[in-house]
Amino acid sequence: MRGWFRLTVGLLAVVLGVLWTVLGLGYVEGSALTDQRLWAVIGPVVVLIGLVTLWYGMRARR
């Protein structure tokens, strides 16, 4: 079970980061985050953190 927690957190961070980026760029309507440049910047940062966490999770599983 080594690495499963990191993999889960990393995947969640990637999904949330992509969602925040799409909302911040205004591609999805109906949210308080729509067309907010702050979320268009925070989203890719969270995606990168999630990818690093996924990488560490994969290394821990080996």
Image (cartoon, grey):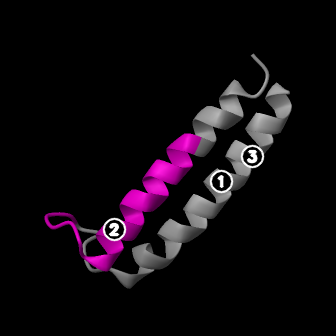
**Neighbour tally class for label 3: few under 14, some 14-19, many 20 plus, Cα within 10 Å:** some
Q: Position of residue 26 (x, y in %)?
A: 25, 76
On screen, 18 above or below 58?
A: below
Question: Which residue range is magenta in the image?
Answer: 11-31
Question: Where residue 59 is drawn, which disc sits there?
Answer: none
Counting residues from the start of the chain, the first of labels 1 and 2 encountered is 2
Q: Residue at x 70, y 36 (%)?
A: 6
Q: Residue at x 68, y 26 (%)?
A: 4
Residue that sits furthest to the top in the current view: 1
Gap between marks 1 and 3 measured at Cα: 6 Å
- Which residue does the numbered mark 1 point to in the structure image? 51
Quarter placement of the C terminus: top right
Answer yes or no: do the residues labelled 1 and 3 have beta carbons within 8 Å?
A: yes
**Neighbour tally class for label 1: few under 14, some 14-19, many 20 plus, Cα within 10 Å:** some
For mark 3, give the secondary structure.
Answer: helix
Amino acid carrying label 1: it is Leu
Quarter placement of the N terminus: top right
- Which residue does the numbered mark 3 point to in the structure image? 55
Q: Main secondary structure of the magenta part?
A: helix
In which quarter of the view is residue 27 placed? bottom left
Q: Residue at x 72, y 53 (%)?
A: 52
On screen, 41 above or below 20?
A: below
Residue that sits furthest to the bottom in the current view: 37
Amino acid carrying label 3: it is Trp
- Which residue does the numbered mark 2 point to in the structure image? 22
Gap between marks 1 and 2 measured at Cα: 17 Å
Query: In this image, 35 relative to 6: left or right?
Result: left
Q: Position of residue 39 (x, y in %)?
A: 42, 73
23 inside magenta stretch:
yes
